[in-house]
C-alpha cells in the first residue's frame, strides 16, 4: 500500500471532485458504506479470482469479515435493507478506498480508489445507456484523450450455456477463463461439460467477433441463430447501442462478442474503458439484475459503473494532461520582530476571512531567508510587518514574481492584493 504525497493526493481529489460534479448533474445521491463488511456478503458473486484476493480476518467478536474489494455488493445490501421502499429509480454515488491482495505492478495496487455510480429499479435499455453516457461525460470532463469503450453482453454467452444445460457454477468458471483471455482453457472446460459440438463452434465463433460498427451484431446473430435466449441478448444490446448514438456518444467503441468480466453477478450489458497508453481498464461496469435479491431483497434490477481514480491519474500523466483547478493565491506574513507575532496572526486571520490562503513565517528566519524560502515554495505575496510601518497602520506588500514591494494601509491590504492579481 502507498503513501500519497501532496501532488498525488491533489490529483486524486481533483478527479474525485469531477466525479461528484457528474453525480450532481445526473441526479445521483451520495451514500457512504463501511470499509469492512461480512465476508459472506462480499464473497457472493464476486468471482473465485477476486475471492482469493480479499483481505479476510476474524474480528474480536469472532465474526468473519473482509475489507471491501468493490462497492456494488455493499450498495446492493443497502438497497435490499434500508432503501427497499425508496421510490424507483434509485441513483447512488459513492467514492473511497478498496482493497485487493494483487501483486503490486503498474496500475494495480492493494489499496486503490474508485468512484462508483449505481442505478437501481429499471431493467430498460435506457438505464444501461445512461450509465455509459455518464461514464463518457466523466472521462471527458476529467480531460482524458482518445479513450474508447469495449462493450459486450453477458446474456449472449449465458443464453447459450443455459440452453445447453450448463449450470451457473460452471458458467462462472468458463467466464473467469474468458475474462483472462484463456480461450483454449475455456473451450476445454466447455467440452468437459458434455455440451454439443454446436455449442463449442458457437463460442469459438463468438471469440473471433469484434468490431466498431453495428454490423458486428449481424455477425453475432448468424453464429447464435439456434439460441433464442442469446438472440434476445443481442437485441437488447442493439437497443442500448441505438440509444447511445441517439444520446450523442461520439467516443469510439468496440463490440466484442466473447467479452466477459470477472465478477459473477453480471446479467446483461458489460463494458470497460481504455486508453492506448495503458493495457488495463480505467473503469467499467454492467448490468446485474439478481444481486439485490441475493441479499434478501425483492427483485430490483441494477446497472452501474466504477471508475478507477488511481488509474485515471496514471493515464493523465501518460498523456501529459494537467488537471485544471483554481489555485489559491498563497500569502506569507512575516513579522520582523517576534514581539509582532500577535499582530501577524491577526493579519493572517483577516486575509483568510478575505478568501486568501495565508500562513505565518514560523521558523524564526531572517527576512531574507524567509523571502527566499517563500519564493522556492511558490508563494505569491509576502506581507512584511515592521515596527515603523505598523505604528502608521501600514504593512509592506511584496509581489514575489515581480520582485516589487509597496507600502499599503492595513485596512486596504486585501483590496491591494486583488488589484495586483487582476493586473496579471
Image (cartoon, helix red, strand yellow):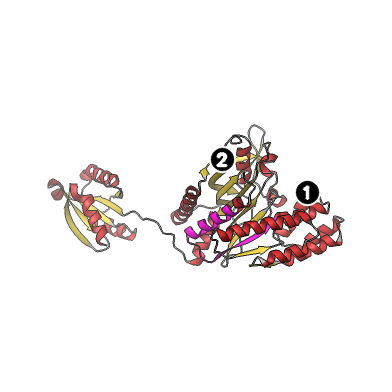
- How far from the left and from the top, in percent, is residue 420? 23, 58
- Total count of labels: 2
Cβ atoms under marks 1 and 2 closer than 8 Å: no
Q: Is residue 297 above or below residue 142?
A: above
Question: Which mark is on residue 34?
Answer: none
> Residue lying farthest top?
61
Residue nearest the viewer, comparing 97 with 359: 97
Return the mark for residue 169: 1
- Mark closer to the chain start, 1 or 2: 2
Please state if 230 lies on the left or on the right of 71 as rendered: right
The quarter of the displayed image where residue 246 is located = bottom right
* Looking at the image, residue 63 lies above or below residue 351: above
How far apart are labels 1 and 2 at the CA level? 29 Å
Element class at badge 2: loop
**Residue 149 in picture, x, y percent from top left:** 60, 62
- The percent position of residue 280, horizontal first and vertical second, equals 61, 61
Q: Secondary structure at mark 1?
A: helix
Q: Nearer the viewer, residue 72 or 213?
A: 213
Q: Nearer the viewer, residue 190 or 389?
A: 190
Q: Residues within 10 Å of mark 1 (few under 14, many from 20)?
A: few
User: Which region is colored magenta?
Assistant: 129-153
In reply to whether residue 145 is colored magenta, the answer given is yes
Horizontal and vertical percent for residue 223?
77, 64
Please tell me how crowded label 2 is: few (under 14), some (14-19), or many (20+) other residues with Cα within 10 Å.
some
| Residue drawn 55% across the image and 48% down it | 97
> Is residue 399 among what the camera can see?
no
Q: Is residue 52 visible?
A: yes
In the shown orientation, is residue 16 left or right of residue 61?
left
Q: What residue do we see at 66% from left, 43% from top?
A: 42
Q: Is residue 392 magenta?
A: no
State which quarter of the image contains the C terminus: bottom left
- Please give the label number shown on residue 33: 2
Amino acid at each position: 500500500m502507498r503513501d500519497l504525497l501532496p501532488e498525488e493526493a491533489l490529483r486524486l481529489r481533483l478527479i474525485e471532485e469531477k466525479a461528484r460534479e457528474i453525480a450532481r448533474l445526473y441526479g445521483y445521491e451520495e451514500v457512504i458504506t463501511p470499509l469492512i463488511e461480512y465476508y459472506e456478503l462480499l464473497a457472493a458473486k464476486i468471482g473465485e479470482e477476486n475471492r482469493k484476493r480479499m483481505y479476510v480476518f476474524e474480528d474480536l467478536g469472532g465474526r468473519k469479515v473482509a475489507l471491501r474489494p468493490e462497492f456494488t455488493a455493499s450498495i446492493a445490501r443497502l438497497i435490499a435493507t434500508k432503501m427497499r421502499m425508496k421510490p424507483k429509480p434509485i441513483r447512488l454515488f459513492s467514492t473511497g478506498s478498496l482493497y485487493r491482495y494483487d501483486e503490486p505492478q503498474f496500475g494495480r495496487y492493494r489499496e486503490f480508489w474508485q468512484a462508483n455510480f449505481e442505478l437501481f429499479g429499471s431493467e430498460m435499455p435506457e438505464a444501461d445507456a445512461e450509465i455509459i453516457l455518464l461514464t463518457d461525460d466523466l472521462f471527458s470532463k476529467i480531460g482524458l484523450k482518445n479513450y474508447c469503450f469495449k462493450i459486450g453482453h453477458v446474456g449472449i454467452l449465458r443464453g447459450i450455456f443455459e440452453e445447453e444445460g450448463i449450470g451457473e457454477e460452471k458458467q462462472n468458471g468458463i467466464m473467469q477463463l474468458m475474462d483472462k483471455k484463456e480461450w483454449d482453457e475455456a473451450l476445454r472446460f466447455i467440452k468437459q461439460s458434455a455440451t454439443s459440438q454446436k455449442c463449442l463452434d458457437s463460442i469459438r465463433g463468438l471469440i473471433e467477433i469484434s468490431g466498431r460498427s453495428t454490423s458486428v451484431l449481424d455477425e453475432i446473430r448468424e453464429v447464435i441463430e439456434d439460441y433464442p435466449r442469446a438472440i434476445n441478448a443481442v437485441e437488447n444490446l442493439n437497443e442500448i447501442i441505438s440509444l447511445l448514438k441517439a444520446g450523442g456518444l461520439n467516443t469510439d467503441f468496440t463490440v466484442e462478442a466473447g467479452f466477459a468480466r470477472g465478477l459473477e453477478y453480471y446479467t446483461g450489458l458489460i463494458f470497460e474503458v481504455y486508453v492506448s497508453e495503458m493495457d488495463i481498464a480505467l473503469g467499467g461496469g454492467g448490468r446485474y439484475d439478481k444481486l439485490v435479491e441475493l441479499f434478501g431483497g425483492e427483485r430490483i434490477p441494477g446497472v452501474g459503473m466504477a471508475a478507477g481514480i488511481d488509474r485515471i491519474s496514471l493515464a493523465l500523466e501518460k498523456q501529459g494532461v494537467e488537471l485544471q483547478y483554481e489555485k489559491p493565491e498563497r500569502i506569507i506574513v512575516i513579522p520582523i520582530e517576534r514581539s509582532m507575532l500577535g499582530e501577524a496572526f491577526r493579519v493572517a486571520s483577516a486575509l483568510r476571512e478575505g478568501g486568501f490562503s495565508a500562513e505565518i513565517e514560523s521558523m524564526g528566519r531572517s527576512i531574507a531567508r524567509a523571502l527566499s524560502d517563500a519564493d522556492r515554495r511558490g508563494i505569491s505575496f509576502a506581507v512584511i510587518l515592521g515596527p515603523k510601518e505598523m505604528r502608521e497602520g501600514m504593512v509592506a506588500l511584496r509581489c514575489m514574481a515581480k520582485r516589487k514591494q509597496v507600502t499599503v494601509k492595513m485596512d486596504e491590504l486585501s483590496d491591494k492584493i486583488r488589484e495586483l492579481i487582476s493586473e496579471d
